[in-house]
Image (spheres, rainbow, N blue to C red):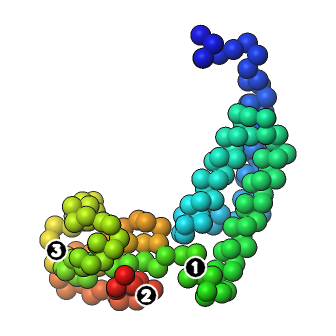
Amino acid sequence: MDWIYQSDDPLLQTIAACFLIFIAIIVLTRIVGLRSFAKFTAYDFAFTVAIGSIISSTLTSSTTIAQGVTAIAGLLLLTFIFSTLQRKVTFIKNLISNAPLLLMDGEKMLDENLKHARIDKGQLIAKLREANVLNYSQVAAVVLESTGAISVLHKSDDDEEFNTDLLQGVRRTP
């Protein structure tokens, strides 16, 4: 039963650390902003994974709460700096962010773009089903977003107009 519980397990310390880390994340997120946990870019994803790793090591190893909070604050600061630079410096934006990629233009599947994105036609069709698309004629566009999510823009009837501004910044070729 030692693998379930040992009498010298620091359970109270772990509970206290959970509470303190939770409070620290709330306070730091309020200071830096909720964008910290958004998943817009690759560095946002890396940040989220790193935060989870820091929390885990703080709660389960010899890493102190002060070290954990400092590491989390440092990552939040880096996220704030990178998001600011990304908005202001085009070179950094292009370096950090993947531009969204068009996978379907109307009814037409863009095979070269699907191949480049390593997305199978079956996966694309599954996304169309999830979006309740009944016919390819309903599809205005399908976009692989910079987050890795797939957006299906579709019409409910043929008379509905598609605002092409929705494709601003979307690459038509890989």
Whether residues under marks 1 and 2 lie with C-beta atoms below 8 angstroms apart, the answer is: no
- Where, by quadrant of the figure, is residue 135 drawn? bottom left
Q: Which residue type carries mark 2? A: Gln
Q: Position of residue 153 (x, y in %)?
A: 31, 75
111, above or below 11, in the image = below
Q: Report helix, strand or loop for mark 3.
A: helix
Viewer can see residue 1 = yes
Q: Toward the viewer: 28 or 102?
A: 102
Which marked residue is nearer to the observer: mark 1 or mark 2?
Answer: 1
Spatial CA distance of label 2 from label 3 is: 22 Å
Q: Residue at x 64, y 53 (%)?
A: 50
| Furthest-right residue in this view | 66
Q: In this image, 160 relative to 34: left or right? A: left
Viewer can see residue 27 = no
How crowded pointer 3 is (Cα within 10 Å; few <14, some 14-19, many 20+) is rated as some
157, above or below 27, in the image = below
Q: Residue at x 70, y 47 (%)?
A: 54
Report which residue position mark 3 lands on. 136
Spatial CA distance of label 1 from label 3 is: 35 Å
Q: Which residue type carries mark 3? A: Tyr
Q: Which residue type carries mark 1? A: Leu
Report which residue position mark 2 lands on. 168
Q: Residue at x 33, y 79 (%)?
A: 102
Q: Report helix, strand or loop for mark 2.
A: loop
Report which residue position mark 1 lands on. 95
How crowded pointer 2 is (Cα within 10 Å; few <14, some 14-19, many 20+) is rated as few
- Where, by quadrant of the figure, is residue 156 drawn? bottom left
Quadrant where the C terminus sits is bottom left
Which marked residue is nearer to the observer: mark 1 or mark 3?
Answer: 1
Q: In this image, 167 relative to 73: left or right? A: left
